Amino acid sequence: MEVIFADDAGPPALAFDIDGVFKAGKHWFPDGLRALARARAAGCPVAFLTNGGGGMNEADYLRDLKKKIIAGAEETGEERARLAGHLDGIGVESMILSYTPMGEDPSFRDKRILLIGDPKEKVKAVARGYGWTNATHVDDYGLLFKTADPFGSSSGEPSGGKKSHSAASSDEHPPSGPLMS
């Protein structure tokens, strides 16, 4: 199939939202690899977007994404390997996680940041990787300020032991320093 571009402008850049395009929940679509290989073969630059991040940095997320797209493909053997070869030139600059824009902005490095996400230790590691020196995970904040955690329990475990991405906070009780360690 020949791809024709209007006014010799060159190939369009394609930005893919991962969930709904390559997968639904934990189910990876079998035609994702073929579609992506076709776009790359036509010379289209690609980017991947997600409103999550799973506590991974961009490089780890992209590596995992490529593996899952390949594993979910309906093609097998040599055909799968041939199509997978189209993913080789896709670099980390093509992976945009929910927190990527903040991580690339040096003005956030010393700002007070409330981290929300699981798994907690991975989220904190990503924050450290960005150089954020005053970031606190919501679970740690909830342990320090039990009345600020609406899901807290008398056991002292934040969110009552449930995984919740909700918390209430105020400048009235800010953390006294980074809780990254």
Image (cartoon, grey):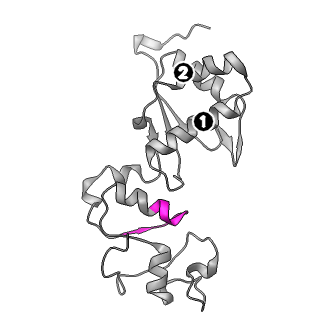
Judge left or right: residue 40 versus residue 10. Answer: right
Label 2 sits on what residue type? His
Residue under circle 2?
A: 86
Q: Which tag, 2 or 1, sits closer to the chain's start? A: 1
- The residue lying at 53 percent from left, 26 percent from top is 87
Which amino acid, by three-letter code, is at mark 1?
Lys
Magenta segment includes 136: no
Q: Which of marks 2 and 1 is in front?
A: 1
For disc 1, the marked residue is 67
Q: Which of 137 and 35 is in front in this view?
A: 137
Element at label 1: helix
Q: Measured from the top left, where is residue 6 in percent x and y?
A: 46, 13
Q: In which quarter of the image is the C terminus?
A: bottom left
Image position, residue 165 (x, y; %): 56, 69
The segment highlighted magenta reads 113-123
Quick check: 73 above or below 118? above
